[in-house]
Image: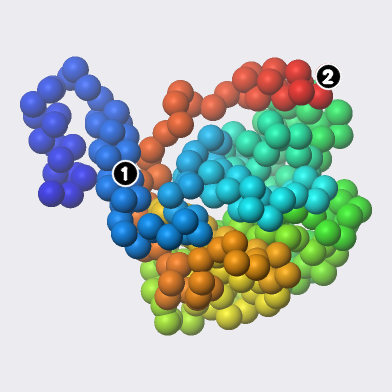
């Protein structure tokens, strides 16, 4: 029985005593637990079982933490573009572990909200925030103006379209780890990458990003070490850092996770708030 049918059944039994959203969250948690006990993930080098959500959209927070537990950190610096309003992305949780970095987003509304609600963290220099529509032509300038180390620990890319093209244009930094959204509609061995379009905006259709196999073959100098269980993000570690720490082979066929976007409804507790972020992170700054 699928989630939709189960939701309808539970609502029929319990009526108004339980909300549809809560039912969906409970079912998503149950489905997630079922997936993670699949023998496919038994190897201790697999990253899927380490997935967990703090502020990430899905289970990226736990996977990122596990990757750096294996390879260590250098300067604890991140760059993320496509950060939204700052309450749900791949690098917020890192600020709680004394990281620093740069956020870039093209939404005036989102950047305004971040600047207004996280002033102390920004003024302390731990977080730099830039409003810009990202292209292959401006990305290096946007980063290098605020990040002065060539090597950084983490780069996270999620702009719902030109992700690979922008990533491929970056020369000013050499990330140790890259997180990039992939188009899970195109299963291995399909090679798909949307044509570059500087004016592209995602229409909530299948015209975005690149297939996992395309990324595996074209993110040069890096190994594909895993994907989020939801089928949203792929994780790449620089070749010189991989060793025997991750599950081989480093192929899309081995690490592909299908689109399970319905699992994106699982939560890590109550909704995130700027008040909690600003207070907690300010305490760390002091």
Q: Nearer the viewer, residue 207 or 181?
A: 181
Residue 286's disc number: 2
Q: Is residue 49 above or below residue 214?
A: above
Q: Is residue 195 above or below residue 170?
A: below
Q: Residues within 10 Å of mark 2 (few under 14, many from 20)?
A: few
* Residue 85 drawn at (x, y percent): 62, 37
Q: Judge from the rendering whether residue 169 lies leftward or rightward of residue 180; answer left or right.
A: right
* Picture quadrant of residue 221: bottom right
Q: Is residue 10 above or below residue 224?
A: above
* Residue 109 drawn at (x, y percent): 65, 37
Residue beneath the point at 43% across and 49% down: 49
Q: Nearer the viewer, residue 56 or 50?
A: 50
Q: Nearer the viewer, mark 2 or mark 1?
A: 1
Q: Indicate the quadrant containing the C terminus: top left, top right, bottom left or bottom right.
A: top right
Residue beneath the point at 75% across and 60% down: 175
Residue beneath the point at 48% across and 47% down: 50
* Residue 259 drawn at (x, y percent): 37, 60
Q: Which secondary structure, mark 2?
A: loop
Q: Is residue 97 visible?
A: yes
Q: Which secondary structure, mark 1?
A: helix
* Residue 236 drawn at (x, y percent): 61, 64
Residue beneath the point at 68% across and 55% down: 71
Q: Is residue 12 above or below residue 226?
A: above
Q: Judge from the rendering whether residue 55 lies leftward or rightward of residue 69; answer left or right.
A: left
Point out the tag, 2 or 1, that comes first from the N-terminus: 1
Q: Is residue 162 visible?
A: no
- The alpha-carbon separation of the residues under discs 2 and 1 comes to 39 Å
| Pointer 1 residue | 33
């Amino acid at each position: 029985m699928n989630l939709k049918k189960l939701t309808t059944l539970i609502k029929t039994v319990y009526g108004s005593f339980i909300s549809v959203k809560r039912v969906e969250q409970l079912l998503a948690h149950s489905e997630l637990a079922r997936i993670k006990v699949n023998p496919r993930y038994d190897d201790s080098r697999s990253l899927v079982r380490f997935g967990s959500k703090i502020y990430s959209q899905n289970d990226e927070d736990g996977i990122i933490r596990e990757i750096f537990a294996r390879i260590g950190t250098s300067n604890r610096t991140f760059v993320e573009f496509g950060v939204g309003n700052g309450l749900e992305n791949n690098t917020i949780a890192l600020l709680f572990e004394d990281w620093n970095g740069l956020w870039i987003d093209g939404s005036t509304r989102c950047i305004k909200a971040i600047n207004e609600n996280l002033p102390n963290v920004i003024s302390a220099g731990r977080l730099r925030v830039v409003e810009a529509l990202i292209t292959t032509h401006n990305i290096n300038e946007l980063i290098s103006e605020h990040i002065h180390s060539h090597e950084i620990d983490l780069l996270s890319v999620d702009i719902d379209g030109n992700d690979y093209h922008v990533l491929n244009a970056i020369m000013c930094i050499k990330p140790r780890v890259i997180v990039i959204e992939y188009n899970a509609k195109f299963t291995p061995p399909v090679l798909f990458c949307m044509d570059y379009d500087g004016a592209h905006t995602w229409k909530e259709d299948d015209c975005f990003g690149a297939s996992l196999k395309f990324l595996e073959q074209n993110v040069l100098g890096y190994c594909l070490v895993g994907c989020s269980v939801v089928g949203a993000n792929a994780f790449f570690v620089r070749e010189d850092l991989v060793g025997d720490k991750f599950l081989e082979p480093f192929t899309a066929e081995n690490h592909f996770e299908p689109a399970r976007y319905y699992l994106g409804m699982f939560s890590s507790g109550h909704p995130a708030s700027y008040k909690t972020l600003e207070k907690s992170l300010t305490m760390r700054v002091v």
